Image: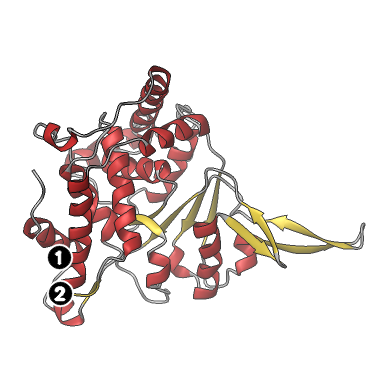
Amino acid sequence: MPGDNSENAESMVSDTPPGPSGEARQQSDVARAALTALRGEVAKTVVGQDSVVTGLVIALLCRGHVLLEGVPGTAKTLLIKTLSRALDLDFKRVQFTPDLMPGDVTGSLVYDNRTAEFEYREGPVFTNLLLADEINRTPPKTQASLLEAMEERQVSVEGTARPLPDPFVVCATQNPIEYEGTYPLPEAQLDRFLVKLTVPVPTRDEEIAMLQRHAAGFDPRDLSEVQPVAGAAELAAGRAAVRAVHLGPEVAAYVVDLCRATRQSPSLQLGVSPRGATALLATSRAWAWLSGRDYVTPDDVKALARPTLRHRVQLRPEAELEGATADGVLEGILAHVPAPR
């Protein structure tokens, strides 16, 4: 995520309502400090990837889900496992495979011989942080089993709705280079993910540091060094503070103009839906709060536009053949649409 560039933002908040009370501000500051400390804990096992950690925290603050995309061996799974330990949240992992059934994810009714009745046994979806590893390896029927859980935060079995824990966040991973034998997520399900984060290959210096850790005896399966620095209480306080972040009418109009521009782009056959506009609003507010401000600036919107919108647009085949990318098209739209001053 880019840094905080807000020197000229004071004019955007001249009509900002009175700030929170002293107690609420103190809770907000404590929550921000705890969530910011996550970077240090994750860095104990994962070298680099600060921007990805920030994106994950933003998703937690917005009660949104995350799609992580990166080549094998970039520590996607280790990153989520470390984050769950540093957050002191319940964590479960599902390895998605072609033979995985919907009931393996959501749970199912099982006949109990002792009582002669069917009883419901919860699936791994009943957790705070669910790692859906290689989600594009499983058929659409099983992928769809997550739709209700992601959108409604509940699972319905035999007409009975069972609420999921709070918080509940799905972190799904997929490999961007190997598509043989995979089932690409449909647009309707992609739109359920708040952000799509690209996990890059580490830089040369980061890779050297990683090798030095392994040479010194580092074991990626041993996370005992990672200590919980935040939990459900800090997340709840952070969410309350994010909801209080002010959005000026000019910035709201800027968000709408960016999303509408994607619908008119000649390179795109599918633009951002109104759901995408509300998602960009939410992530921009969370980023503003993490940056220590109680108002949103155009720079906040620009910083979150690519991770929030890249999976909500679809390139035209001819543009794809010419080498266009979703990030490149969004970059052009950000440069073309005038930002408020």
Asked if residue 45 lies left or right of residue 131, the reply is: left
Q: In front here: 239 or 53? A: 239
Q: In front here: 338 or 82? A: 338
Name the residue located 33 percent from the left edge and 41 percent from the top edge: 53
Q: In front here: 316 or 14? A: 14
Q: Marks 2 and 1, how far apart in space?
A: 7 Å
Q: In the rendered structure, which disc, 2 or 1, sits on the residue that comes first in sequence?
A: 2
Asked if residue 192 lies left or right of residue 310, the reply is: right
Dot 2 corresponds to which residue? Answer: 267
Q: Looking at the picture, which amino acid does disc 1 mark?
A: Val
Q: Secondary structure at mark 2?
A: loop
Dot label at residue 329: 1
Residue 289 appears in which quarter of the rendering? top left
**Label 1 packing within 10 angstroms: few (<14), some (14-19), many (20+):** many
Q: Looking at the picture, which amino acid does disc 2 mark?
A: Ser
Do the CB atoms of the residues marked 2 and 1 lie less than 8 Å apart? yes
